Amino acid sequence: MNEPGKKILISGGGRCNFTNRDVSPANFLSDNPHFCRSALARYTPADFIALVERHHIAWHEKTLGQLFCDGSARQIVDMLMGECRRANVRVHLSEKVQAVTHDGSFQITTSKGELTVRALVLATGGLSIPKIGATGFAHDIARQFGLKVTPLRPALVPLTFGASDLAWMTPLAGIAADATVSCNAGKFREALLFTHRGLSGPSILQISSYWRENTPILIDFLPGENAHALLRDAKTSRPRAEPKTILSEHLPQRLATTLAARLLPETQMANLPDKTLQVAGEALNRFAVTPKGTEGYAKAEVTLGGIDTGALSSKTMEATQVPGLYAIGEAVDVTGWLGGYNFQWAWASGHAAGLAIAERIRA
């Protein structure tokens, strides 16, 4: 690419959600859920915050421990490039890598010449957001050297739906609601957003990492509420009200009207049998809908899967069978939740590899 850090620049709405205050292995998906523990413990959010503050970058905390720049994500890129200059790092831009070979050292053939190096770090991310240059380069080089790559799929990505579901979802495009969304082992309470193609918003992006084809997701439209009890009490206290009126006091009006029409007869609460209210209440707390797919890598914030951690040292990120070859960040089969976790994995895994390479050079 013609400049570094393009993914950083677009992250967090242009303000870069550069880490999260609360990071643990539980915030990551991997075939080996313990692999990330060592690197994360040795370079913590506090370490990166200290770096940010040394560069006098103002920041703030939003919900769920997410940390953002007060200003522009450009500040984070400038900070990292400043650190590179301080360490006499040479940066090559607009230079395509054409081949990598290894005979004790690594020979890298590029569109502008050749380089010979003792250590090579695969730090080129995954497949998400190809318009800013994302490719499968790291995975291709890993395979070339005999490293396994786990199955890849878009993650932190909006979900799409078939025609029957879109018929009721599309008129709600633009409406957001607080919801708890669950699927398989994932469960998240954050905003849900209706779109012209289906569902998005933080809760949906989170659950997309856990969703698999032909599996329903469950949406609790009234998190923290017993929807059946709410409807039953409304029948007693407000018998002449309609269901959509009751629901509109807890949900955006258009969403309330749509859900009422799907789940309950259009009549006064007094006319609704308790069994009907029970079924509707259960549906409001566990609304099942099956996505057709996702919006793909073009809209995915990260790639789920990557270079198999079984081929790497968790302490150094070095390939155990290829001395001098390292892999870090999104290229590896470690995928964080939404909210700064993937950046923290990038910083932590990069730090681990950097320390190991420095020790290698000293030796």
Image (cartoon, rainbow, N blue to C red):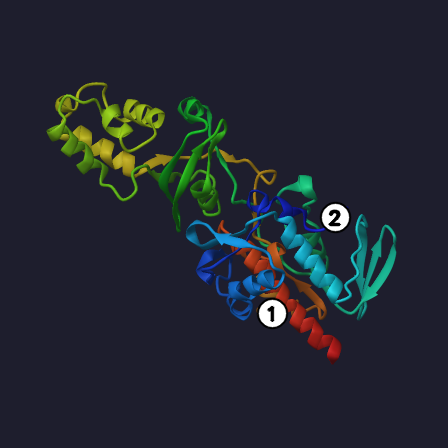
Q: Nearer the viewer, mark 1 or mark 2?
A: 2
Q: How many numbered discs sit on the rendered protein? A: 2
Residue 268: image location, x then y, percent: 17, 20
Q: Pick whichever, 311 or 136, lies toward us.
A: 136
> Which residue occupies 55% across, 49% down?
70
Q: Dot 1: few (<14), some (14–19), or many (≥20) neighbours within 10 Å?
A: some
Q: Is residue 34 left or right of residue 15?
A: left
How packed is label 2: few (under 14 Cα within 10 Å), some, or many (20 or more)? few
- Looking at the picture, how far across and down is residue 105, in whole percent? 80, 69
Given the current orientation, which residue lies at the most extreme left position? 236
Q: What is the x, y in percent for residue 19?
A: 53, 56
Q: Amino acid at mark 1?
A: Ser
For the point 70% across and 74% down, which residue is it? 358
The residue at which mark 2 appears reads as: 3
Residue at the extreme right: 113
The answer to whether residue 106 is seen in the rendering is: yes
Q: Disc 1 marks which residue?
A: 313
* Relative image position of residue 16 (x, y in whole percent): 57, 49
Q: Is residue 274 left or right of residue 324?
A: left
Q: Secondary structure at mark 1?
A: loop
| Residue 125 or residue 224, whichever sits in front | 224
The kind of residue tagged 2 is Glu
| Mark positioned earlier in the residue sequence (1 or 2) | 2
Give the residue at the far top of this rendering: 267
Quadrant in which residue 350 is drawn = bottom right
Query: SS at mark 2?
Result: loop
Q: Are marks 1 and 2 in contact (CB under 8 Å)?
A: no
Cα distance in 3D space between marks 1 and 2: 31 Å
Instruction: Look at the picture and state if 117 lies above or below 199.
Output: below
Which residue is found at the position 49% from the left and 65% from the top? 34
The image quarter containing residue 149 is bottom right
